[in-house]
Image: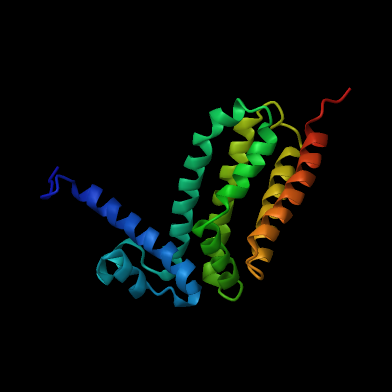
């Protein structure tokens, strides 16, 4: 298989270019919003030609939804790397909720919200996001099942995990109006305390 001067194959160089484009897309979504994220701007930030960008991602919707899928996969890797630590924890549920909170910090969630809002009047983007969203959320569900396999079969377990995600996302979105970090943490502590009540009741052994 032919290799370039860097010793990488064409497939490796192509994969690296895709990653640069996806990372640049997320950076642009966070910095400029969806409307300001143009394919030209992404290509410039990634350091690739427009032709190369179009070759990998023909449309803007392809580009931005692929970027979210890319980051969801990276988020899954981070969560799974914590699995052994949480299994050994004296409070696996509390620690797992805290990990969920931490995983929603930063550019991944900000970029995703930009796309949720932009998808409302855009049927093509909405179709793309409808396919991506289950992939992004299912990773957290699978993590919960791996952490608490003895409870994963409970008919309410899946709903409880989705409720926890809704609480995390709602608190973060509401916090953007004030940008008050102390208030944000206080709201999360309250939310986590109530989620613990939910999970404790759900996971409690029954007679």
Residue in the picture at 48% in, 77% down: 35
In the picture, measured across the screen, residue 66 lies left or right of residue 162, that is left
Instruction: Specify the quadrant that holds the N terminus.
Output: top left
Residue 12, image x, y percentages? 24, 47
Relative to 165, is 78 above or below? above
The correct choice, above or below, for 173 with respect to 83 in the image is: below
Q: Nearer the viewer, residue 161 or 132?
A: 161
**Residue found at the far front of this picture:** 182
Q: Position of residue 197 (x, y in %)?
A: 81, 40
Describe residue 173's horizontal placement relative to residue 41 as left or right. right
Q: Is residue 181 above or below residue 142?
A: below
Rendering quarter of residue 196: top right
Q: How many marks?
A: 0
Please name the residue shown 39% across and 59% down the image: 23
The type of colouring in the image is: rainbow
Image: 121 above or below 144: below
In front of the other: 182 or 19: 182
Residue 127: x percent and y percent?
55, 64
- Residue at the limit of the structure toward the right, as seen here: 207
Residue 188 lies left or right of residue 46; in this view the side is: right
In the image shown, does 7 or 179 lie closer to the viewer?
179
Q: In which quadrant of the rendered view does residue 182 lie? A: bottom right
Residue shown at the point (44%, 58%) measured from the top left = 67
Quadrant (top left/top right/bottom left/bottom right) for the C terminus: top right
Q: Where residue 80 sits in the image (x, y, percent)?
A: 52, 36
Considering every residue shown, the one lying at the far left of the view is 5
């Amino acid at each position: 298989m032919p290799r370039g001067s860097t010793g990488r194959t064409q497939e490796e160089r192509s994969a690296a270019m895709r990653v640069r484009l996806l990372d640049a897309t997320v950076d642009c979504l966070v910095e400029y919003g969806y409307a300001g994220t143009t394919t030209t701007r992404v290509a410039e930030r990634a350091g690739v030609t427009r032709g190369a960008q179009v070759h990998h991602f023909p449309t803007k919707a392809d580009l931005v939804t692929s970027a979210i899928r890319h980051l969801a996969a990276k988020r899954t890797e981070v969560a799974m790397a914590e699995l052994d630590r949480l299994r050994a924890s004296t409070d696996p549920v509390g620690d797992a909720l805290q990990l969920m909170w931490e995983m929603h910090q930063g550019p991944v969630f900000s970029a995703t919200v930009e796309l949720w809002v932009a998808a409302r009047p855009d049927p093509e983007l909405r179709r793309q996001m409808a396919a991506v969203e289950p992939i992004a959320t299912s990773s957290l569900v699978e993590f919960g099942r791996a952490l608490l396999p003895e409870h994963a079969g409970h008919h309410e377990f899946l709903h409880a995990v989705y409720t926890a995600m809704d609480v995390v996302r709602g608190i973060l979105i509401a916090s953007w109006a004030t940008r008050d970090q102390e208030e944000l943490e206080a709201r999360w502590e309250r939310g986590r305390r109530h989620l613990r009540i939910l999970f404790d009741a759900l996971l409690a052994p029954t007679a």
